[in-house]
Amino acid sequence: MLLNIIRAIYLVVCGGAIAAYVSTESSLPSFLAPHPLLAFSVLMIVSSSVIFVDILIPKKRIDVISAVYFGLLIGFLLSYLTYTALQPVMFQEYKGISLMVMNLIFPYLCVTMLLQTKDKFRFIIPYIEFAKEVRGGRPYVL
């Protein structure tokens, strides 16, 4: 029930943000400016696809979710730092494409590295591992 309420709130927030974006004609691409209803519909379908993917994958493991989250976080940080370091020596016409390539490569590498090493290096992915231990007469969960 709570998950459905969160999904409904997400759709309402997305609808409001998309309506605000579509209402300003200067922010729309030129081919969508005459068709704001089409732009709203397409953007709502794209934002609703997140809920569709969430419903398709009902059981999510916390170690995979944390590996993806921290991999993306570290990957985009490395991409930004690399771009900032290389920006003074880059040609102007290559700055956009180099940023795009770095934003595609670094997060992918970080996520895959964390997913491949998640069982070998516990300190990389900071999550609590629950283990059942027995002390004395009764077991307790850490």
Image: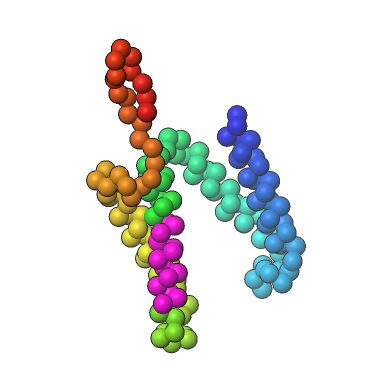
What residue is rendered at 33% in x and 18% in y?
Answer: 139
Quadrant occupied by the C terminus = top left
- Residue at 47% x, 86% y is 92
Q: Which residues are magenta?
A: 72-85
Query: Where in the figure is residue 116, as x and y percent of width and height?
Result: 27, 50
In this view, 80 is above or below 137: below
Q: Position of residue 101 (x, y in %)?
A: 40, 71
Percent across and percent down for residue 18 are 68, 57
Q: Nearer the viewer, residue 41 or 124?
A: 124
Quadrant hosting residue 129: top left
Nearest the eye: 63 or 52: 63
Q: Is residue 63 above or below residue 93?
A: above
Depth check, front residue: 142 or 49: 142
Q: Is residue 45 above or below residue 52?
A: below
- Measuring from the top left, give residue 65's x and y in whole percent: 42, 45
Residue at image position (32%, 29%) is 131
Is residue 101 something that shows in the picture? no
Q: Is residue 37 left or right of residue 2?
A: right
